Amino acid sequence: MEQTFIMIKPDGVQRGLVGEIIGRFEKKGFTLKGLKFLTVDQAFAEKHYADLSSKPFFNGLVEYIISGPVVAMVWEGKNVVTTGRKIIGATNPAESAPGTIRGDFAIDIGRNVIHGSDAVDSAKKEIGLWFPEGVANWSSSLHPWIYE
Ligand code: UDP
Ligand code: MG
């Protein structure tokens, strides 16, 4: 089953959106496989966003991600990478549809509340980086009520 890496950024934590965000993924029917609350350092944030290191916003992005604790999660389900990105909404909240997390809770691109992997390959890389110890091995008893 496909997995994705989702992170509630420091602004999402500060603004009390943790329960709301976890609830949206839970209610959709996805399965929580990993969860931790931690503050990462600069080297770790730079590694997570290594692909963006040449961008003009990179330093500000790293500062933002290390500015407070984040909620790191692994969610599992059919098409969870693509559907997770839809639940999150467009990168720039000015363009995120209402009903998406960024569309409902964010205004500026540099304070857009949440991260989600953009492809199955990057999800695998990010899960390996954030959960080197592995994730939980369980399956929900609701499975037959969610999948046909
Ligand atoms: N970002 C920013 N300014 C930009 C583009 C991106 O501050 O012009 C930040 C924003 O927090 C975004 C993150 O960098 O979520 C990673 O950018 P990416 O293009 O990967 O967007 P995402 O995958 O998060 O939608
Ligand atoms: Mg991205």
Image (cartoon, grey):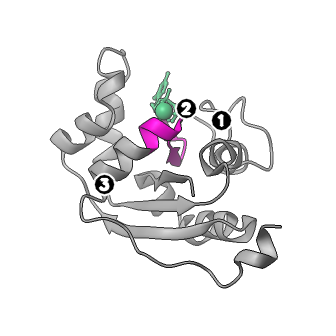
Mark 1 or mark 3: whose residue is earlier in sequence: 1
Side of 70 where 82 appears, left or right:
right
Dot 2, how many residues are within 10 Å of its Cα: few (below 14), some (14-19), or many (20+)? Answer: some
Return the residue at label 3. 130
What is the distance, in whole Å, between disc 1 and disc 2 at their CAs?
6 Å
Q: Disc 2 residue type?
A: Ile
What is the distance, in whole Å, between disc 1 and disc 3 at their CAs?
25 Å
Q: Are marks 1 and 2 in contact (CB under 8 Å)?
A: yes
Q: Is mark 2 within 8 Å of ligand 1?
A: yes
Mark 1 or mark 2: whose residue is earlier in sequence: 1
What range of the chain is rendered magenta? 110-123
Label 3 sits on a secondary structure element that is helix
Instruction: From the viewer's side, name the closer residue of 145 and 112.
Output: 145
* Camera-side mark, 3 or 2: 3
Residue 95 coordinates in the image, percent (x, y): 72, 29
At horizontal 57% and vertical 58% (from top left) the residue drawn is 1
* Camera-side mark, 1 or 3: 3
Return the residue at label 2. 109
Instruction: From the viewer's side, name the closer residue of 49 and 17.
Output: 49
Dot 1, how many residues are within 10 Å of its Cα: few (below 14), some (14-19), or many (20+)? Answer: many
Whether residue 21 is visible, yes or no, is yes
Q: Disc 1 residue type?
A: Pro
Quarter-wise, where is residue 30 in the image?
bottom right
Q: Can residue 120 be found in the magenta stretch?
A: yes
Residue 99 coordinates in the image, percent (x, y): 80, 50
Return the residue at label 1. 93
